[in-house]
Image (spheres, coloured by chain):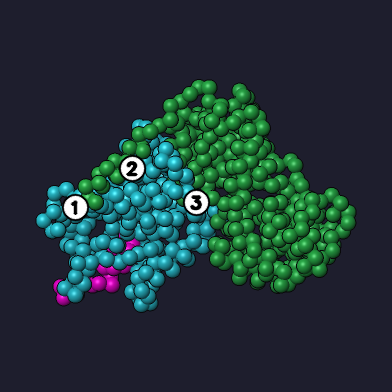
Chain colours: A cyan, B green
Amino acid sequence: MSYFELLSSLELGLIYGITALGICLTFRIIDFPDLTCDGSFVLGAAVAAVLLKLGYNPIFALCIAALAGGIAGLGTGVLHVYFKMTNLLAGILMAFMLYSINLKVMQGIPNIALLNTETMFTWGNPFFSLCAVAAIVWAAISFILSTDFGLALRSIGQNKRLAVNCGVQISFMTILALILSNALIAFSGALFCQHQGFADVSQGVGTIIIGLAAVMIGEKLLPSRSIWYSMFACILGSIVYRILVAAALHSEWLGLQTQDLNLITGGMVVAVMLMPTLGVRKQNA
Amino acid sequence: MKRFLPIIMALFFCSASTVAEPNREIKKVLISQVVEHPALNKTTQGIIAGLADKGYAQGVNLDLRTESAQANAALAAQIANKFVTQTPDIVVGVGTISAQSFIKYAVDGKVKLVFSSVTDPVSASLAVTATQGNPNMTGVSNFVALQPQLELFKSIQPKLTKLGIIYNPGELNSVSLVLKLQEACQKMNIVLVQQAVTKTADVAQAAVKLSTQVDAIFISNDNTALSSLQSIIRAANQRKIPVYVSDTDAVADGAIAALGPNQFEVGKETGYMIANILGGANINSIRIEYPDKTELYVNETAAKNIGLTIPSAILAQAKIIKS
C-alpha cells in the first residue's frame, strides 16, 4: 500500500469517523438502533451540494447540512416517541422516506457534480482540514457527553428505570440524541460530498455497516470507560476500517476477484474482532 | 485456534504490501466498474475485446485489471485512489459514479480518464460540451438518438399515442434521458407516461399499473428496469402491449424490438479509443463518441405472442431473434 493510498484511507476514515460518532451515540450511548443514517448521510450530501452549487460558503453548507440531518433525526424521534413506533421501524421508515426527500432537495437530479465549485478542500490540504474538523467535532461531542446533560443521556442506555427515577425525561432525551446523531451523520455526508466532488442519491448505501464496524473495531482497539477515549475510539475504528478496505483491495494475489471484496473486508473485520485483547479486558474474561 | 490467528491475520495484512512492479513495455489499463450488472459487464468485456483487436493482449503487452465498486460510492473512491497510485497509463470508469470518482485526479493531471457507458457526460461533469471532455477526460457515451427509435415504434404500431417509460429517478443517466425523450415525444405527437421505480422490487407493480395506461412500454438503459425486465414483459404480455428496449441484448429476453448499439459495441468503441491513446494520441484532442452503429433487432416469437404483426419492411432490415 502506498503513501498516497494510506493518506486517502486516513481522509475517508476521518470523514466516516464522524458518522461513527453519530452511530455510537444512538446504538451505544442511548441503546437505540437507529437506521435513519443511510438516509441522513445522503441528505447531508444533497443539501451541501445544492448550497455549494448556489455559491454559498462551504462551511455554511456544512452547518445547514447538519441542521437538515437534525430535522431527519427529529422525524425518527417523533415517529418513535409520539407515534409509538418500534425504534427499528421508525428509523427504517424515515430512511425510506428520505430517499424521495433527497431527490426533491437535489431538484430531481440524482447526481450533482461539484467540479469547479469552491469546497472547503479547495482551500488547503484536505488531510489537515479534515483532522481539524474531526478534532473539533470529537472535542465538542465528548464535552457535551461529559456535562450533566450528557450524563443524563448516557444513563438512558445504561439503565432506563434508574434514569426515570432520577428524573431524566426519557422521550425528550431520546429525541435530542437522535437529532444530534443524525446531524453528525449528515455533517459527515456533507464532508464526503465536498471531498469527493459529487453527491449521489445512492451514496448512503451501507453507511450503517461502515459506521457500526468502525464503532466495534474502535471499542476493540481502545477499550475504555472514559467518554473522551471511547469517542476517539470511534474515529480510530473508522480509520482502521478504511485501511482494511484498502488492504482488501490488494488481495488479487490470493486469486480473489472483485466480487469477493465484501467477504475479504468482512473477514478482516472479524480478524480484528478476534484479536487477543491487549491489557484491560483480560480481567473480565 | 487462537495460536494460529496472528498467522492468519498476517496473511491478510501482508496482502497490502504486494504492489505490482511497473514495466514500461507493458501498458497498464485499470477499469473501475460501478456495479456488477449484465449490461455493464458486457461493456467491460467489449473494452477488452476492443483492445485485443488493436493488438493489446492481457499478459503480453497489457496489464488490465477490473474492480467493481458494488454500487458503493465510498468504495468507488477508494478504488479510484488505489488505481491512481499504481501509475496507470489509462484509467477507465464504466458507469457514472465510477467515472466521477476519477475526475479530481484527472483535473490535476494525475491520470488520463476514459469513461464508458455514461449517458450524459455533461451533467456528470465529465465534459464541457457533448463532444469535448474536461481536461484529461474523454470517452464513449451510450446515449442513442431518440428520434429514430420513436420512428421505429410508430412504424410497428401506427396507432401509438401513449408511450410508457419505467425508470429509476435515482439514476442520472435515466433522468437526463427522460427529459430528452419528453421533447422528442412532443414532436412526434406521442404522450409520454412516466413511471418511476426506486428499486427492482417495485418494478412488477409499477409495470402492471403502467401497462393499463399505455400502448407500449419503452425501457432505455436504466439499470433498475433492465434488471427486472422479465416482470415488465410479463405485465405487458397480459395486456398484449409490446415492450421496446434500447439495449439490443435485451431483445433475446423477450422484448419486441430494439434499435440501438449493444453494450458490447459501446465497450469495443471504448477499447479502440483506449488503444488510440496508448498509441500516443493526445487525450484532450479526442472527441467524446456516441454509438454510431445502431442495429435493429426484432423478436418474432414475442411479437406473435401478443398478436402483433411487424411490417415486412422492418423485418427485412432487422436481425430476427426467435425465443
Label 2 crowd bin: few (<14), some (14–19), many (20+), radius 10 Å: many
Q: How much space separates mark 3 and mark 1, taking CA atoms?
A: 34 Å
- Label 1 chain ID: A
| Residue positioned 42% across, 38% down in the render | A253
Disc number lying in front (2 or 1) = 2
| Residue positioned 71% across, 56% down in the render | B252
- Of residues B239 and B159, the one nearer the viewer is B239
Secondary structure at badge 2 equals: helix
Q: Is residue B184 above or below residue B93?
A: below
Same chain assignment for discs 2 and 1? no
**Marker disc for residue A223:** 1
**Marker disc for residue A11:** none
Task: Looking at this view, name the residue that lies furthest to the left.
Answer: A283
Is the stretch drawn in magenta largely helix, strand or loop?
A: helix
Q: How much space separates mark 2 and mark 1, taking CA atoms?
A: 24 Å
Secondary structure at badge 1 equals: loop
- The part of the chain drawn in magenta is A165-180
Same chain assignment for discs 3 and 1? no
Secondary structure at badge 3 equals: loop
Q: Is residue A123 above or below residue B228?
A: above
- Of residues A165 and B171, the one nearer the viewer is B171
- Label 3 chain ID: B
Label 1 crowd bin: few (<14), some (14–19), many (20+), radius 10 Å: some
Is A7 on the left or on the right of B96, as rendered? left
Is B62 on the left or on the right of A247, as rendered? right
Q: What residue would you read off at disc 3?
A: B71
Classify residue B156 by image quadrant. Answer: bottom right
Same chain assignment for discs 3 and 2? yes
Q: What residue would you read off at disc 2?
A: B12
x and y percent of residue B121 in the render? Answer: 61, 42
x and y percent of residue B85 in the render? Answer: 43, 32
Q: Earlier in the sequence, mark 3 or mark 2?
A: 2
